[in-house]
Amino acid sequence: MMKSLLFSVHPTPPLLPAPHLRKLLRLRASSSSSYASASASTSTSSPPRAGRRSPRPPPSRRSSLYARPSLLDMERDRAARRADVDAFLSSLGVDPGELAGLELPVTVDVMRERAEFLRSLGLTHEDLAAYPLALGCSVRKNMVPVLDYLGKLGVRRDALPDLLRRYPQVLHASVVVDLAPVVKYLQGMDVRPVDVPRVLERYPELLGFKLEGTMSTSVAYLVGIGVARRQIGSVITRFPEVLGMRVGKIIKPFVEHLEAIRLQRVAIARIIEKKPYVLGFGLEDKVKPNIDALMEFGVRKEALASIVMQYPDVLGIELRDKLVAQQSLFESSILVSRDDFGRVIERMPQAISLGRAAVLKHVNFLTACGFRLSQVSKMVVACPQLLALNMDIMRMNFEYFKNEMERDLEELVDFPAFFTYGLESTVRPRHEMVARKGFTCSLAWLLNCSDAKFDERMKYDTIGVDEMEAEDSSDMNTFAEEVESEEDEYSDYDDSDDEFVR
């Protein structure tokens, strides 16, 4: 019974499959056969390569939008562009070889923009050829910031061409690093802000100086020899070139040579304060030859210092030719001998620059007053200032002398400096006081003294003969400063041939 139960739970499988199972088996067999046929076909057409995948074919270069040029192609393109730029530079007259190591714009259009901008500033093709590196400056990054800064300082537009010709390197400068410190230094030296642009226009090379270099040492030396610190700003404003002069090579030898002709340092300092451009006179080619020429024409060595003090310009003019011409003029028109010509120069060195017309005009006036030519010669040697005085002043003084003072002409021959005194300020009031006192005195005793001294004399009851004779020998050097201070008023000096800038 147990045996029959076991068989009933696990019946024995039939030997033949059921109908739906046979159909499934046939479909599976058909699918396996198709896959085997496809595999055989694939293996026949392209046998498999063990361990390596089949490579994809490379994309065509011509059909790609993202292809990169090779380094060789890039180099060829760059060379072609540079050749175009070089051709443009040659058309401007600029040698491209001078810019061979400089990174230039890659296109002609940019280079043309730079050239046109520089020409708009007033520079010519010749200027660009003289300094082609200006074309290496970017308009927006270099030129515009520099020019804008100079314009804000007050540099004039019409002064830019000359400034750029003299110092084109300013176009490469940094406003913050190079230019602003120089301007600040000038203002620290008491150069007024309104004068700073004039200084830069006159001496643009200053913009390339280093503060701790020549500028500082030259100023320190000038102060050391006695130039007043408060005058340094004025000296720089009128002669900014002094900031570029080396002390050991230029300034110190100049000062020492003037000391050698017995000019004191304090006097040299005053000359520099008044006319700082004398420092620009070349020592070897101007100063020494001019001093030698003065001595050659009769000036005594002990008088050289006085001459330089009265007329510092004598150190820098074309002196020898002037001396030859003036000596000939004085000999022919005033009968001044060669020896006396040296005395004339000692007493008024400005006589070197007097024009022929001015000399003859004054000589004719004196002869018209009744003086003989020999007397005029004596008067001129004693007081050369006669040849430079204002004619109206001389005429008024002479009329008063003749009509009111009623003195003899010979007194004017003995004291020609009478013409140098102001009529209303000195001659008339003193003459009237002497007349009221009833004194009889020489012109020298009357005029050749200070107001304080004259007031003291008016307290006397009589005039001592010895005192009057002592006053008769007047020192004509006392009139030099008076005439020099009136140089601007008179127009008889012939300075047109001077070779220096004042």
Image: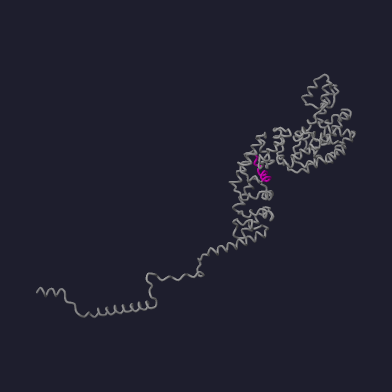
Instruction: Name the residue located 75 percent from the left edge and 44 percent from the top edge.
Output: 499
User: In the displayed image of the protein, which residue is found farthest to the top?
Assistant: 461
The x, y position of residue 110, in whole percent, is 61, 58
Q: Against 9, is 307 above or below?
A: above
Q: Nearer the viewer, residue 457 or 130?
A: 130
In the image, 476: left or right of 90? right
x then y, percent, for residue 488: 77, 38
Give the mark count.
0
Does residue 198 belong to the magenta stretch? yes
Give the image quarter of residue 23: bottom left
In the rendered view, tell whether residue 344 sits above or below residue 66.
above
Occupied quadrant, residue 359: top right
**Which residues are the magenta region?**
191-203
Residue 147 appears anywhere in the view: no
Q: Is residue 397 left or right of residue 200?
A: right
- The percent coordinates of residue 224 (x first, y second) are 65, 34
Q: Is residue 367 above or below residue 432?
A: below
Place of residue 22 in the rendered image (x, y in percent of width and height, measured from the top left): 25, 80
| Quarter containing the C terminus | top right
